[in-house]
């Protein structure tokens, strides 16, 4: 494996994931987060910088693990990486979000945007791997 290409794929995917997270998990339906304000951590007086940085780092972690799995499995084409992204979404991300929705008071629009956001996040990692890691 070419490590320069690996880190380039992780960097590109991580940046793209950060922007998609901002759209799907931050900006889209932002007002719906206030439907149940008691479930969110209070950042009064401290700001959200730490939480945002943690989220960004987790996006880069997602990209790195996805690229490593694709590399180990020999998945480099769009079709194989996107299938893997869809499989991970169906097996892990979607059930986890829906389980949270059963037990935690989330507005349905937040559940929908987070679900789609995770599919986009994994698809962006898949595209970066297909474009750069070949």
Image (spheres, grey):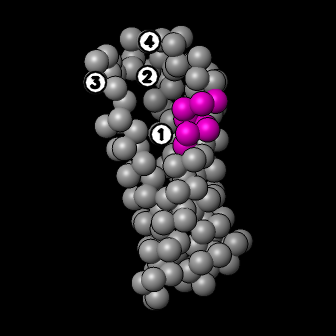
Residue denoted by label 1: 96
Residue denoted by label 3: 46
What's the CA distance linking mark 4 and mark 2? Answer: 15 Å
Question: In the rendered structure, which disc, 2 or 3, sits on the residue that comes first in sequence?
Answer: 3
Question: In the rendered structure, which disc, 4 or 3, sits on the residue that comes first in sequence?
Answer: 4
Can you tell which of label 4 and label 2 is closer to the viewer? 4
For residue 39, what is the image quadrant?
Answer: top left
Can you tell which of label 1 and label 3 is closer to the viewer? 3
Classify the position of the C terminus by image quarter: bottom right
For residue 117, what is the image quadrant?
Answer: top right
For residue 44, what is the image quadrant?
Answer: top left
Residue denoted by label 2: 103
Question: In the rendered structure, which disc, 1 or 3, sits on the residue that comes first in sequence?
Answer: 3
Q: Residue at x 35, y 35 (%)?
A: 49
Position of residue 69 measured from the top left corner of the image (x, y, whole percent): 46, 72
Numbered circle sitting on residue 37: 4
- Secondary structure character of the magenta stretch overall: helix
Q: Residue at x 42, y 65 (%)?
A: 65
Q: Is residue 49 left or right of residue 80?
A: left
Position of residue 41 measured from the top left corner of the image (x, y, whole percent): 33, 21
The magenta region covers 21-28
């Amino acid at each position: 494996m070419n490590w320069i290409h690996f880190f380039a794929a992780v960097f590109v995917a991580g940046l793209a994931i950060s922007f998609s997270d901002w759209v799907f998990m931050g900006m889209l339906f932002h007002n719906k987060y206030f439907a149940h304000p008691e479930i969110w951590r209070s950042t009064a007086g401290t700001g959200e910088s730490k939480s945002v940085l943690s989220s960004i780092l987790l996006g880069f972690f997602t990209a790195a693990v996805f690229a490593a799995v694709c590399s180990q499995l020999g998945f480099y084409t769009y079709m194989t990486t996107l299938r893997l992204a869809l499989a991970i979404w169906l097996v892990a991300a979607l059930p986890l979000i829906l389980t949270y929705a059963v037990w935690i008071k989330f507005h349905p629009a937040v559940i929908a945007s987070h679900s789609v956001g995770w599919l986009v996040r994994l698809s962006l990692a898949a595209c970066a791997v297909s474009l750069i890691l070949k």
